[in-house]
Image (cartoon, rainbow, N blue to C red):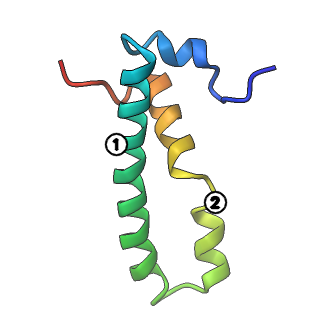
Amino acid sequence: MSVVNPPIDNLLEQVDSKFTLCTLASKRARQINDMIHGVRDQALNVMSASDVSHITDEKPLSLSMEEIAQGDVKAAQ
């Protein structure tokens, strides 16, 4: 059973090492987190707090791992 979704094997196919995976995922998660907070602040002006929290349920690190597995985010060469 895999704790990480997507599976770690799929993630490691996209990068050259676990260190690169960790660094890339954390940097992308930080970008996503910053983006979500900026959008959340604006969205609170027109939506209820419960609606906004429902939209941003998925964690930034999970989103970054999915993007890496899909090949949407790559490490700089």
Give yes or no for contact between labels 1 and 2 (Cβ–Cβ under 8 Å).
Answer: no
Q: Residues within 10 Å of mark 2 (few under 14, many from 20)?
A: few
Left or right? Give the position of 2 relative to 23.
right
- Which residue is more in the foreground, 40 or 15? 15
Residue type highlighted by circle 2: Asp
Q: Residues within 10 Å of mark 1 (few under 14, many from 20)?
A: some
| Res 7 → quadrant | top right
Depth check, mark 1 against mark 2: the one in front is 1
Instruction: Name the residue carrying label 2.
Output: 57
Residue at x 34%, y 42% (from the top left corner): 27
Residue 27 badge: 1
Q: CA distance from mark 1 to mark 2?
A: 19 Å
On the image, the x and y values in percent for residue 8 come to 60, 19
Q: Earlier in the sequence, mark 1 or mark 2?
A: 1
Residue at x 51%, y 19% (from the top left corner): 11
On the image, the x and y values in percent for residue 29 come to 42, 47
On the image, the x and y values in percent for residue 13 come to 47, 9
Left or right? Give the position of 36 relative to 4.
left
- Which residue is more in the foreground, 6 or 25? 25
- Quarter of the image where the C terminus is located: top left
For label 1, the SS is helix
Residue at x 57%, y 42% (from the top left corner): 62
Residue type highlighted by circle 1: Lys
